[in-house]
Image: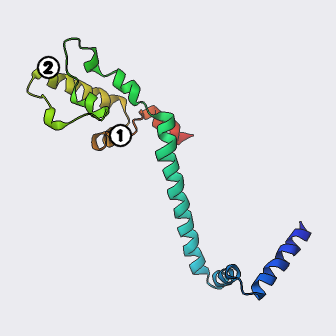
Amino acid sequence: TNQEYAVLRFDMQNRARLQHWDTKILKYLRTRPRVKYILDILALYCCFIGCGFFLHQLLLPALCDVRDVVLKELPSLSVEDLEEKTSVHLYMRQEYSPAGDSEEEQYMYDATLKDETYVYNVLSTDSYNALMGNPAAVLVTQAGTLLFYGT
């Protein structure tokens, strides 16, 4: 209202007369619009970083992570005579060590190839590429990605 505006204006004039730091900054920015513009862009960028972190690191994993579903439906888990788990299964559970890999056996290689193909077909491209570089990456299907970013 008008009365609140008058009180606020009176308070700011008193603060300016007393040389408070906030009024000095406001006066400096009022006389230099380019500096104010640069600071506005910097502030917007900082807000964007915070919102992006919240979306990608906190909200996306909580709502759309399908790691358990993908692990349960790996084709190699349906093979009864396969005693060892494939490297894809171990990698997704973050237990994979390339030194103990047994690719010499043909059936293990085939099972690993089937698992990799299945994971590639189920996940979105971003999730698959993230998984290949980071076993702790969030796994999201293409539909989950579209729903998350489309809403």
The quadrant of the image that shows the C terminus is: top right
Quick check: 7 left or right of 26?
A: right
Residue at far top of view: 80
Amino acid type for the residue under numbered disc 1: Ala
Question: Which of pointers 1 and 2 lies earlier in the amino acid sequence?
Answer: 2
The residue sitting at 58% across, 74% down in the picture is 37
Q: Nearer the viewer, residue 35 or 23?
A: 23
Question: Residue 20's image quarter?
Answer: bottom right
**Residue 22 appears at what percent x and percent y?**
68, 78
Mark 1 residue element: loop
The quadrant of the image that shows the N terminus is: bottom right
Task: Assess disc 2: are there few (<14), some (14-19) or many (≥20) residues with their C-alpha within 10 Å of its C-alpha.
Answer: few
Q: Is residue 118 above or below residue 15?
A: above
**Residue 53 appears at what percent x and percent y?**
49, 51
Q: Which residue is mark 1?
A: 136
**Residue 120 appears at what percent x and percent y?**
30, 32
Rendered image coloring scheme: rainbow
Q: Which residue is mark 2?
A: 107
Identify the disc placed on residue 14. none
Residue at far left of view: 104
Quick check: 78 left or right of 139?
A: left
Q: CA distance from mark 1 to mark 2?
A: 27 Å
Question: Residue 16's image quarter?
Answer: bottom right
Quick check: 88 left or right of 6?
A: left
The residue sitting at 37% across, 33% down in the picture is 123
